[in-house]
Amino acid sequence: MPEPLRLGIIGAGFNARLHVQSLVSVRDVELGGVTSRTRSSSKRLAAYARELEVGAPEVFDDTESLAASEVVDALWINCPNDARLPTMEAIVRGNARRAKPLLGIACEKPLARTALEAESMCRLAEEAGVPTGYLENMIFVPALRRGKEILWRRGASSAGRPYLARATEEHTGPHSSWFWMGTRTGGGALIDLMCHGLETARWLLTAPGAPRSSLTPVQVTARIDCLKWTRPEYAAELKRTMGDEVDYAKRPSEDYASASVLYRDEEGNRLITESTTSWCYVGAGLRCTVELLGPEYSMQLDTLDTGLTVFFSRRIAGSAGEDLVEKQNAEQGLMPVIPDEATHYGYVGENRHFTRAFRTESTPELTFHDGREISRILAACYLSAETGQAVDMQSADLAGFEPAVSCGTWRP
């Protein structure tokens, strides 16, 4: 039996908990260390790991100490967006103190708030000489991976490659207050959720085994708006539940975004991705829908079509929670149930892939460079939304662009 890869997780919020939960189904890995903004949240995540028997992690006071410790072999960055670049700088300092360098550094989506910050993340990783991974769980959703494999094997081989991919992700809004603050996240629903849709659609259109660079982004057209949370009653609700710093009457972020990206493949074929996302969807819970279309075939996925539903009459009054589905909005009526969210949303497959890649010193499917390209496309989306014009990906100055929403000056 190989020695388990010992992970260190930086950040102890909702997403980090899903990563820990997924480790139950991943072989040869355990949680070795945790650090976050507060020691109490780190202790809770460490206790959860011990409860699931996926490690007995040590709690660290800061990122540099965790990165320097021999109790971890690789690090997962799950901290807020505005902390990712300082976190990477601390990892580089800690790695320099190690007898053996880290085997890998993986960062949760998005890689950074801006294209310039994403470039800095790549540069720091290259200076440290540590392999990287870009954590995009959606491309590891079991149903999507199976669907892509079937369509390319049976459909594309006979009728020609697919040419249109659509990906939508919607829910009622983030769990934590920092997500709602454009200056901390780099934007709103677009940067929070559309990074999923952009990469998922790009991946579906990429031939199996081909690099992401086989598709060249040519033009981006996008729109953003705030449809729900700037309404006075909802802006007041946000301030009441998230704190005074979240003031959508004065400093809103977008709660809706749509984008279309034109690509060309290596043979010059025109391919299109369409992505839509929002924080103003009210339904049973988080909803992701994906489509892939080709000359004589198509594929559809809806993550709320789980195959399992329960019904509670109005006589049953349950307490509010998310025990049935993420971003659950009701406790009565006909409700879908996701039995294993860590598997359903791709976290098990994602962590199985990246831990194996780092352990075997092989290049993972996604690296910081792929995250950097998504950051460039996100920047183009914001630029298009601000100017009302299509953005030419070959000529636009995206590295120096900072969206108005990330500066706190955007108004719908």
Image (tube, rainbow, N blue to C red):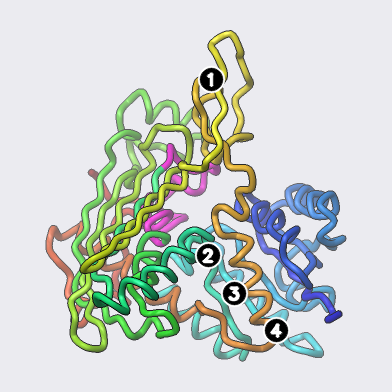
Instruction: Tell me the quarter of the image containing the C terminus.
Output: top left
Over which residues does the magenta segment extend?
171-195
Residue kind at label 3, given as amino acid type: Met
Q: In which quarter of the image is residue 159?
A: bottom left
Residue 251 versus residue 133 in the image, above or below = above
| Chief SS of the magenta region | helix
Number of numbered discs:
4
Q: Which mark is on residue 88? A: 3
Residue on which disc 4 sits: 103
| First-in-chain label (2 vs 3) | 3
Which of the two labelled residues, at mark 2 and mark 1, occupies the earlier sequence position?
A: 2
Task: Check whether the beta carbons of the residues at disc 4 and disc 3 lie within 8 A of each other.
Answer: no
**CB within 8 Å, label 1 to label 4:** no
Q: Name the residue under label 1.
A: 332
Left or right: residue 215 versus residue 173 is left
Which of the two discs, 1 and 4, labels the residue nearer the N terminus? 4
